[in-house]
Image (cartoon, grey):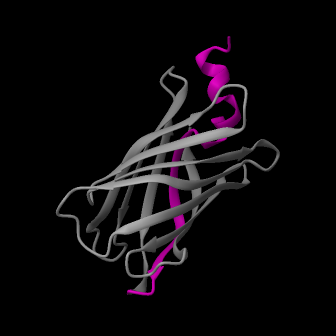
Amino acid sequence: MANNTDNVKSIAWLIGKWESTEATASFPSMQPMPYKEELVFTHVGQPMLNFSFHAWNPQTGKPLHKESGFLRVKPGTNEVAFMCAQNLGIVEIEEGSLNEEHSQVDLESRAIGRMSFATEPHTTKISRKFKLLKGDTLEQTVFMSTTKHHELTPHLYAVYKKINE
């Protein structure tokens, strides 16, 4: 049986602190908006990575959203699961695949839960991709559909530089 380090070896390229150099949120119901974001992926000896994301307005410093959770690889496969809780009242489970050759993780929501008083329109589907562009440059794209906009639509695009291990 693989040890806990072996279970995360294929996604170890994500480990570290990343800060956005470029980031834009957009959706049909909003004006495109630049934001700043910090991603932190850590490994604490369990067979998964822990993560936390937080975003803020680059002009005012006002916090926008926070997310935390886990990224797990199914042992012996290229299957991955991304489990995430957001301060906006959403909990997601996304599953997908890892392309080790291209240092890329592709995910799609399998379950989305929300608190009873979450703001409408409600998110109904999410598609997310992490791709290592170079050793110190990471790209994340997020597509989303809602109860008002039914097709997966570009929502977030960000490029990050690794600022430490």
Q: Indicate left or right for 124 with 59 as reference.
A: right
Q: Is residue 45 above or below residue 126?
A: above
Q: Is residue 133 above or below residue 152?
A: above
Q: Where is the C terminus found, in terms of image quarters?
A: top right
Image spot of residue 113 (x, y percent): 33, 53
Q: Is residue 13 magenta?
A: yes
Q: Which residue is at a point 68% across and 29% down the rendered structure image?
A: 9
Image spot of residue 11 (x, y percent): 65, 38
Q: Indicate left or right for 139 with 19 as reference.
A: right
Q: Is residue 38 above or below residue 80?
A: below
Q: Which residue is at a point 59% across and 18% down the rendered structure image?
A: 4
Q: Is residue 9 above or below residue 69?
A: above
Image spot of residue 31 (x, y percent): 40, 88
Closer to us: 151 or 143: 151
Q: Which residue is at a point 68% across and 11% down the rendered structure image?
A: 1
Closer to us: 46 or 133: 46
Region rendered in magenta? 1-29
Q: Indicate left or right for 90 with 83 as reference.
A: left
